[in-house]
Image (spheres, grey):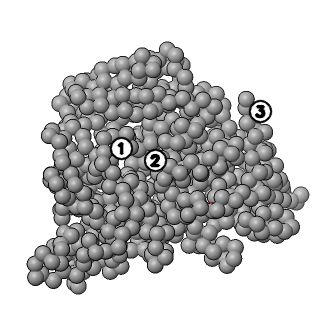
Amino acid sequence: MGRRFSSVIAVVCFSFLPNLLTAADGKQTLLVNADHRASISLDGDWHVIVDPYDNGYYDFRMQPRPDGYFRNEKPDSSDKLIEYDFSKSATLKVPGDWNSQRDSLFFYEGTVWYEKDFQYQRRPNTRTFLHVGAANYVAHVYVNGKKACDHEGGFTPFDCEVTDLVHDGGNFVVIHVNNQRTRDGVPTLNTDWWNYGGLTRDVLLIETPETYVDDYYLQLQRGVGSIIGGWVHLVDSAAGTPVTVKIPELSLAQTAPTDAQGRATFSLTATNLQRWSPEKPKLYDVEISVGGDRLNDTIGFRTIEVQGDNILLNGKSVFLRGVSIHAEAPYRSGRAWSEQDAETLLGWAKELGANFVRLAHYPHDERMTRLADRMGIMVWSEVPVYWMIEWENPATLANATNQLQEMIRRDRNKASVVLWSVANETPNTPARLAFLRKLIETAHTEDPGRPVTAALLVTTQPDSPEGIRTKVIDDPLGEYLDVLGCNEYIGWYEGTPDLAPRTRWKSKYNKPLIMSEFGGDAKFGLHGATTERWTEEYQENIYRQQIAMLKQIPFLRGLTPWILMDFRSPRRELPDIQDFYNRKGLVSNEGQKKKAFFVLQEYYNSLGAQSK
Ligand code: GCU
């Protein structure tokens, strides 16, 4: 069968109904603002069965078992031969990846079955959803032994409707999670980050009224004045159902009827709006009410757009002083998910003098974007279309499209998120161009209010006789992007650090450039000459030389050096230096700041002072 069971069916459904994000059977959806909805947390200890041969699903003929582990049968229930028992099985923490919780699972890629018992009392005239913040990589969800829904993609949330599956009193949920990499997956076989598997983010039970708000989009309209426009989408509502949006602090309230598709459209004129910005990250309480139901959110209002080679925030040119971040948990390692993880990572970014972060290479936990909203840090958010993807496979395109739509749907009301990225370091081929053009179109359709970017590789022209190197941004994908991102490793993978100031940059496009990656590895505490690789001095020198080069690029509008903190990677095996860590961090995974941290901090503080 090759692919995991049943995902083939799911993929087919998605490709026909790309924009609805609801599976054909209506069982899987994505409830926006899940963290502010009435919910019961199922986080904590879950019983697990590590199942390398998927024995809990397939029989010896590799045929799906009718009585697989999802049934959660108890060995003592009959004389039937049962060879598993969740209640006696060990537990793992949820949220959390399995690799960092148990040494024996450090390298594990395969299936793990998760089981949790829960008590539940359903209130009349309500619907119940099982919300999963993220499950890497494919998840099959069962409640009380019956299939609830499936999901593919390790970094975006999904909600399974379980109204007909739950009952009053004792219930159980079983989730089959598999993180095996596949050729047609997104990401695919090769990544420079650890393939942490499991239920890596919150699992909640969410209750809604029978007619409920699943999605909304409220943004400050570009151009003059302060018009907050957008829509609210209701599921299973009669056309003409009145929906009210209130922003009490602005004395704004408007009621609008839903149309035949369940969408109510709004246009609110704010007189004394304080726009969201890094300097003043103002958020407003927003109330959305329908009948007796009410949803609260906190939203900042700002505009972000591109004009020529400028990026305008609230109509003013802005320079994005950034850093790239992986969702690696500081100090303990493993997939980051907690408020503490977010505070530590964004706290270091703030200390650097950053007003921007690139959350690489996949959507991070919603706590990161919520905190970025509050801290005034702008965000580049990305889908894991990374290196080599099966560009010509329609199922892979449907999968990437779905992940992109889920990323946008979860965070399009976050003022901090200013850029969607559709790809990282992908090869310049016609199939790739066609694939990514579709993603860019989808992003613009799902969110007309934000520019789209991607991290490109650039062409290097032969050096001049004087030793000047010229880089040209001429990737055909640049034509379709709003903002150009470029990854370069002058001084690490290419030449020596002093090559950077001798490098000139040209672009075929009159568009803003963000240098989305540069840097080099250094083991914290390893010292030596500036010419000695792996030392802090060598990395420090890379940054000094890079900054000298970057200052010369007239259309540079931001940078996100690689990377804030050392992170785990299966591709980094140099003993006593890497030990399965990519050491390009400015901070070690134990929170120790390397010399280069202070070089960048000095540069950002000087820029910050200029922009005041
Ligand atoms: C690449 C890639 C990163 C990787 C980095 C590195 O550019 O985008 O994911 O970690 O280089 O080699 O350190």
Q: Quadrant of the N terminus?
A: bottom left
Secondary structure type for disc 3: helix
Q: Position of residue 336 (x, y in %)?
A: 51, 57
Q: Residue at x 24, y 40 (%)?
A: 208
Between 310 and 365, the one lying in front of the other is 365
Identify the residue position indicated by label 1 in the image: 34
Q: Amino acid at mark 3?
A: Gln
Instruction: Say the numbered circle drawn on residue 610.
Output: 3
Secondary structure type for disc 1: helix
Between 290 and 47, the one lying in front of the other is 47
Q: Residue at x 64, y 47 (%)?
A: 349
Q: Amino acid at mark 1?
A: Ala
Q: Residue at x 10, y 78 (%)?
A: 78
Q: Quadrant of residue 557?
A: top right
Q: Is mark 1 within 8 Å of ligand 1?
A: no
| Residue count near mark 2 (Cα–Cα under 10 Å), binned few <14, some 14–19, many ≥20 | many
Q: Is residue 257 visible?
A: yes
Identify the residue position indicated by label 2 in the image: 366
- The numbered mark, 3 or 2, whose residue comes first in the sequence reads 2
In the image, which is nearer the foreground, mark 3 or mark 2? 2
Q: Amino acid at mark 2?
A: Glu
The reply to whether dot 3 and dot 2 touch (C-beta < 8 Å) is no
Q: Residue at x 33, y 77 (%)?
A: 51
Between 27 and 168, the one lying in front of the other is 168
